[in-house]
Amino acid sequence: MIDTLLRAFSPREAEVLSLYFVHRYSTRLIAKHCGETPEVIRQVAGIALSKLRHPSSRHLLQSILDDPEVNFLDVAMIRNLTVDDLVTCMSCSRRFLPTSSVSDDGGRPRQYCSNACRQKAYRARKSRPQTTRH
């Protein structure tokens, strides 16, 4: 099933993601393996992860999570996560990992699984009648 997911990427991106997340290689080792610099590998991984986070790629991840043969706890263990790290989206009730672009020492945790869910919740709040405070 992970192979199906990796087919959505270019061969270079798939190799970097596989080595980094599945085999737990460092960017330095991947760079040696591919004949690139660690910075180039970080950029390739960043581009691939941004593709994976895009709402149009949700079906790829959802198919893995919905597959009865794939235990979500196994996927979490591969990524060194626990079920306690997952949060429920306030809009669609999906479980997601609240990764943030803000460092761990500050910032608000994400409440929505995607920008689309955040916008949907915002529109729903705005369409409610305003209450006046006294």
Image (cartoon, grey):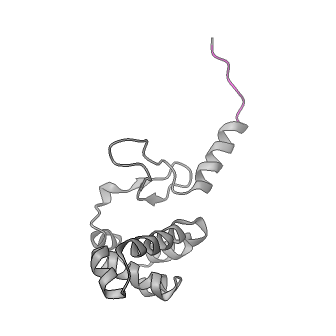
Q: Quadrant of residue 38?
A: bottom left
Residue 51: image x %, image y %?
54, 71
Image quarter where the C terminus lies is: top right
Q: Which residue is drawn at 72% across and 30% down?
A: 129
Q: Which residue is drawn at 33% across and 76% down?
A: 20
| Magenta region | 128-133
Where residue 31 appears, x then y in whole percent?
Answer: 33, 80
At x 56% / y 50%, what residue is drawn? 91
Residue 10 image point, x, y percent: 52, 85
The residue drawn where x is 61% and y is 70% is 56
Magenta stretch: includes residue 84? no
Examine the rendering and report whether any part of residue 33 can be seen: yes
User: What secondary structure predominates along the stretch shown in magenta?
Assistant: loop
Direction from residue 124 to residue 50 in the image, left or right: left
Residue 15 quadrant: bottom left
Which one is nearer the viewer's eye here, 95 or 28? 28
Please indicate whether residue 66 sits to the left or right of residue 83 in the image: right
- The image shows a total of numbered marks equal to 0
Which image quarter holds the N terminus? bottom left
The spot of residue 131 in percent (x, y) is: 67, 23
Out of 111 and 73, give the one closest to the viewer. 111
On the question of residue 23 being in view, the answer is no
Along the line of sight, which residue is nearer the eye, 69 or 41?
41
Name the outermost residue toward the top. 134
